[in-house]
Amino acid sequence: MAAPEPPSPRPPISVLFVCLGNICRSPMGEAVFRHRTSSDPRIKLVDSAGTESYNVGNSPDERTMSVLNDHGIVDYSHAARQVKKSDLTRFDYIFAMDRSNLQDLQLLRQRAAARGTTDKLAHVVLFGDYGEEQGEEILDPWYGELWGFEAAYEQLVRFSDGFVKKVLDGNQKS
C-alpha cells in the first residue's frame, strides 16, 4: 500500500502595507517585514503604498529611515506610491495601519467585487489584528516626535511576528 500524498505546500504569498501617505508607517512596515522574513521562501513579494497621492515619488520620512537604521535595517529604499485597484489581485494580503486606511481599502475591495472580477481578491485586514489584541492601530507618527516612530517600529515587529506565527506557521487559516 502506497503512503498517502503529503499535503501540497502553500504557494508563496505577497503582502502590501498601506497607510495614508506611504512615507512613515507603511514603508516602515514593508522594511521590517522584509527584514524579518528575508530568508523565508513562503514570502514572494513585499511592498507598500498609501491611500492618498500627495507623497507619490517621495522617499520615506527621515525619521522612518533613522529608526530603521537604528535597528539594523540599512538597505531599504522606497519611492512612495498610491494604492491601485490592481493591488487587490496582485497581493494576497493588504495590511492597513489604522481603521481609516482599512475603511478606504475595504471600499476599494467592495467596488472591485461589485464589478464581478473573477480574480481572487486580497485579504484586506488591520495589521494590528496580528498582535496580542485584535484591533490595535499603528498611530500616524508624522505629526510627532521620534518616539512615535519607535513605537510604530515596535508594533510592526510584533505584528510581523504575529502574522508569521498565525498564518505562515499554520496556527490560523488564511
Image (tube, helix red, strand yellow):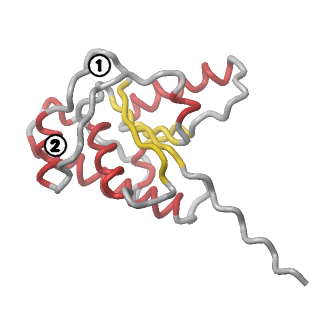
Rendered location of residue 104, percent (x, y) = 46, 24
Q: CA distance from mark 1 to mark 2?
A: 23 Å
**Position in image of residue 150 (x %, y %):** 16, 49
The percent position of residue 75, horizontal first and vertical second, equals: 21, 47
At a point 52% along the width and 65% down the height, the residue shown is 169
Q: Choose top left, top right, bottom left or bottom right for residue 57.
A: top left
Q: Residues within 10 Å of mark 1 (few under 14, many from 20)?
A: some
Q: Which residue is mark 1?
A: 56
Residue 160 in the image, given as x and y percentages of width and height: 38, 54
Residue to which mark 2 is pinned: 148
Name the outermost residue toward the right: 1
Q: Left or right: where does residue 139 sit relative to residue 70?
A: right
Give the farthest residue toward the bottom.
1
**Number of numbered discs visible in the structure rendering:** 2
Q: Nearer the viewer, residue 7 or 140?
A: 7
Q: Residue at x 38, y 22 (%)?
A: 82
Residue drawn at x 57%, y 37% as measured from the top left: 122
Residue type at mark 1 is Val
Camera-nearest residue between 145 and 160: 160
Q: Nearer the viewer, residue 100 or 13?
A: 13
What type is the residue that disc 2 sits on? Gly
At horizontal 22% and vertical 23% (from top left) the residue drawn is: 58
138 relative to 72 in the view: left or right? right
Identify the mark nearer the N-term, 1 or 2.
1
Mark 2: few/some/many CA within 10 Å (<14, 14-19, 20+) = some
Query: Depth check: 74 or 128 in front?
Result: 74
What is the quadrant of the N terminus in the image? Answer: bottom right
In the displayed structure, 52 sits above or below 102; it is above
State which quadrant residue 10 falls in.
bottom right
